[in-house]
Every structure is written in C-alpha cells, then in structure tokens.
C-alpha cells in the first residue's frame, strides 16, 4: 500500500490535475479524432480515458512491434515519429520535458495550461 501511494498516487506526472482537465476539454472540442503522442508516456492511459483522441501507446501485443521507436525513451525525433504514425499533436507536461528540448520543427502550441502543452505537429 505504501508503494502504491508513493509510486502512483503521489506521482505528479500521472495525477489528474485541473490543467489536465482543461486540456481534455480542449481536445474533446477539436474537430475529428486527433492522433496524439504523450510525454511522459505514463499519462497515455489518462489521456486515452478522458478524450476522444487516438493515442500512440504500446499496450497490446500488436503495438510491441513499434514501441521501440518511443518507449521507454525516444529513439527518434518527435517530428519523425509524427510522420511515421500520422500524429497530429503532442500532449506534453513541461514539468517532465521542455518543448524547446524536443527540437520540433514548425511546432505550434495550440493549448497551454500550467505545465500542460498541446502542440500541433
């Protein structure tokens, strides 16, 4: 129980925050079904559960084939992953990684709330 509390409940990267709720509302108002990559990867389940978006995530035996490109660490640039997997957006917690550090060409921030940034790729 202590491990669950420290590793999950107190994990700020995976916690549902007001900023994340605001981002989810924004995503759900986008036209069509956006295709999103999340950083850190630990928030993919939260984003998938709370939005209409298709999320780049490795959770089944089929996706194991391509997970090596981005999990557990990025092995390719985000722009290359966006092209390869037809991604529209990056859902980023800047408390985890700064947008500037990812060196995304032509990145356009379409939403920001606290440390949450939604970037059009």
Image (cartoon, grey):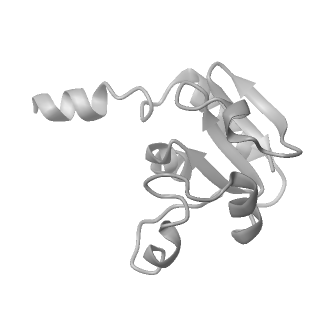
Q: Would you place residue 48 above or below residue 16 in this image?
A: below
| Residue found at the very far left of the displayed protein | 1
Horizontal and vertical percent for residue 44? 50, 50
Instruction: Give the residue at x 76% y 55%.
Output: 79
Q: Is residue 51 visible?
A: no
Q: Residue at x 53, y 73 (%)?
A: 66
The answer to which of 63 and 1 lies nearer the viewer is 63
What count of labels does the image hold?
Answer: 0
Decide: is 49 above or below 101: below
Q: Is residue 15 visible?
A: yes
Image quadrant where one finds the N terminus: top left
In this picture, residue 90 sits left or right of residue 1: right
Point out residue 83 in the picture as x, y percentages from the top left corner. Answer: 77, 66
Q: Is residue 55 left or right of residue 44?
A: right
Image coordinates for residue 98, horizontal then vertical, percent: 64, 29
Horizontal side of residue 109 vs 99, given as left or right? right
| Furthest residue in direction right, as rendered | 106
x and y, in percent, of residue 114 in the image = 64, 18
**Relative to 25, does residue 18 appear above or below in the rendering?**
above
Query: Which quarter of the picture shows residue 7?
Result: top left
Apparent side of residue 56 relative to residue 43 in the rendered image (left or right): right
Q: Residue drawn 61% across and 24% down?
A: 19
Q: Nearer the viewer, residue 47 or 117?
A: 117
């Amino acid at each position: 129980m202590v491990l669950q509390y420290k590793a999950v409940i107190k994990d700020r990267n995976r916690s549902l925050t007001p900023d994340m709720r605001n981002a989810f509302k924004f995503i759900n108002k986008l036209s069509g079904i956006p295709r999103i990559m999340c950083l850190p990867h630990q928030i993919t389940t939260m984003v998938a559960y709370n939005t209409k978006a298709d999320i780049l995530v490795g959770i089944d035996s089929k996706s194991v084939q391509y997970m090596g490109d981005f999990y557990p660490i990025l092995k390719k640039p985000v722009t290359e992953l966006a092209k390869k997997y037809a991604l529209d957006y990056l859902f980023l917690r800047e408390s985890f990684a700064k947008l500037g550090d990812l060196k995304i060409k032509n990145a356009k921030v379409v939403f920001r709330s606290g440390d949450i940034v939604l970037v059009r790729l």
